[in-house]
Image (cartoon, rainbow, N blue to C red):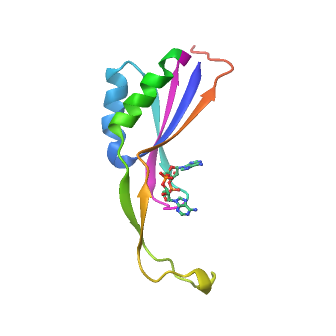
Amino acid sequence: MKMIIAVVQDQDSNKLSSALVEHNFRATKLASTGGFLKSGNTTFMIGTEDARVEKALSVIRENCQSREQLVAPVSPMGGNADSYVPYPVEVEVGGATVFVLPIEQFHHF
Ligand code: 2BA
């Protein structure tokens, strides 16, 4: 068994939830915050059999898209003025950041 942890953009989370249910995957959604942008994203925990990992990855791939996001400039006060960028910078936020972990035990009481 594996645990798939997928960090996705909030805009894709409802679509992905529905697609996972449709394909008979069980998942838990957690509200999370990206460390870099400091804005909300959604983390899915999906426990599944080894044989279904590839299918879960394809469902995630099909339902999450990457987007450009503007990062507002941060005041240099208290920080290093050398690295201060006075204008918004565009970053590409991936459709999904996915980790696949082995599960030692699974219990469902
Ligand atoms: P954030 O940390 O808010 O990052 C959003 C996007 O900002 C990233 O997209 C990347 O394009 C950019 N970025 C992140 N750190 C950067 C840095 N130090 N310098 C320049 N640009 C940077 P993604 O890579 O697609 O990541 C989307 C979200 O997935 C992240 O949101 C974070 O919540 C999660 N994530 C990504 N890599 C992770 C990792 N290794 N461990 C845990 N969570 C991760």
Residue 11 to residue 20: above or below? below
Which residue is depicted at the point 35% across and 23% down?
A: 21
Quadrant occupied by the N terminus:
top right
Which residue is depicted at the point 67% across and 18% down?
A: 105
Residue 57 to residue 91: above or below? above
Quadrant occupied by the C terminus:
top right
Q: Position of residue 82 (x, y in %)?
A: 61, 85
Q: Does residue 47 show up? A: yes
Q: Quadrant of residue 57?
A: top left
Q: Position of residue 93 (x, y in %)?
A: 43, 54
Q: Is residue 108 found inside the magenta-colored segment of the image?
A: no
Q: Position of residue 67 (x, y in %)?
A: 35, 54
Q: Does residue 49 show up? A: no
Q: Position of residue 35 (x, y in %)?
A: 55, 57
Magenta stretch, overall SS? strand
Q: Quadrant of residue 108?
A: top right
Which residue is depicted at the point 38% across and 29% down?
A: 59
Which residue is depicted at the point 45% across and 58% down?
A: 39
Residue stretch in magenta: 36-50
Q: How many marks?
A: 0
* Relative depth, front residue between 15 and 51: 51
Residue 64 to residue 73: above or below? above
